[in-house]
Amino acid sequence: MKAIVITSPGGPEVLQLQEVEDPQLQEDEVLIGVHATALNRADTLQRKGFHPPPKGASPYLGLECSGTVLSIGKNVSKWKIGDQVCALLGGGGYAEKVAVPAGQVLPIPPGVSVTDAASFPEVACTVWSTIFMTSRLSQGETLLVHGGSSGIGTFAIQIAKYRGARVFVTAGSEEKLAFCKSIGADVAINYKTEDFVERVKEETGGQGVDVILDCMGASYYQRNLDSLNLDGRLFIIGLQGGVTTEANLRPLLAKRLTVQAAGLRNRSLENKAAIISEVEKNVWPAIAEGKVKPVVYKSFPLAEAVDAHRLMESSKHIGKILLVP
């Protein structure tokens, strides 16, 4: 099969389409003929030599895909050859075929094309497992999403609105903020020209938001604590703003705050399967109703992965970037 190979750690130019061995199918796995895969920021880190794949996962990039079941392992009963599916991967999406544990496979949501379905597994599992399964965002509460125009952000806005939350976002351009508002964000804050703490306080009568989904880490840590309401929950899923900071911990005590962090890729297969099951039960109906839509900025042929990575690192995009073998 053909796959994108990282020829050596570095910039986008190190990615090359090469002929490689087919994946070996294990007894509990499904072999998918890839119709599309989607980029995630973790792919750019892996390309640079960070964020290695978990033990036993494919060495190739790609944390999600959509496509058709080509074969099934002998312990698999839920899926059959020919099923159209999408899946959460430990790696291997940037290829023509990928083997994936059966518990990480989802049906294509009703009303969504097979191509666009590749944009859902990673964002749906990340957002559902963090702000809902862990931070327990509930109806009537307020959510602040940093990077509102990202793949994660555009999904989080839609599902949080569907669940009855009030949604605040930060983004870095008027075009991105306008898009966030068009898909349901109630308050859109330009982090380049406004202080998001002040704006949050202003919009919540001085109280703050209940839950924050943060991709920045160190650079936003203090301001996030300052932006939370009593019993507020901060969930960190990225460290784009660095890993170390000095913080005043008083707000943690005074406001009974909870700070949590997690990634998705290195969770156990059992944990991923539990998240997938929750996503199918809670998120897929919202997609079927048309209340959560795929947000795809651009699709590239797999051979143009270099250009796709350049676009992602430019941060000009809104939503997801796809690769199609």
Image: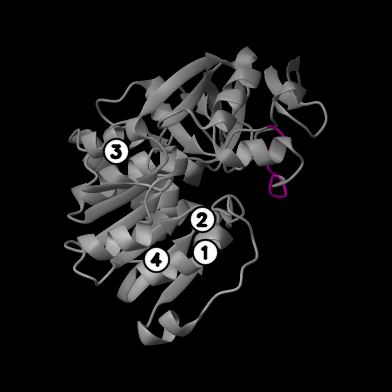
**First in sequence: mark 2 vs mark 3:** 3
| Percent of width and height locating residue 198 | 32, 62
Residue 166 at x, y = what percent? Answer: 21, 55
Q: Rounded to the nearest whole Å, what is the CA distance between mark 2 and mark 4?
A: 12 Å
> Within the image, what quadrant is residue 4 found in?
top right
Q: Mark 3 or mark 1: name the one nearer the start of the chain.
A: 3
Please give the name of the residue rendered at 44% of the width and 30% of the height, measured from the top-left corner. 320
* Circles 2 and 3: CB atoms closer than 8 Å: no
Q: Which secondary structure lies at badge 3?
A: helix
- Are the residues tagged 2 and 1 within 8 Å (C-beta)? yes
Q: Residue tagged by mark 3?
A: 180
**Distance between the Cα atoms at labels 3 and 1?**
24 Å
Chain-order first, disc 1 or disc 4: 4
What residue would you read off at disc 2? Answer: 237
* Residue carrying label 1: 261
- Tally of numbered discs: 4
Disc 1 to disc 4, how far (Cα)?
A: 10 Å
The alpha-carbon separation of the residues under discs 4 and 3 comes to 24 Å
What type is the residue that disc 4 sits on?
A: Thr
Name the residue at 22% across, 34% down: 182
The three-letter amino acid code for the residue at tag 3 is Cys
The x, y position of residue 274, in whole percent, is 43, 56
Tell me the quadrant of the picture where the N terminus can be found.
Answer: top right
Q: Earlier in the sequence, mark 4 or mark 3?
A: 4
Specify the quadrant of the image occupied by residue 253: bottom left
* C-alpha separation, residue under disc 2 versus residue under disc 3: 20 Å
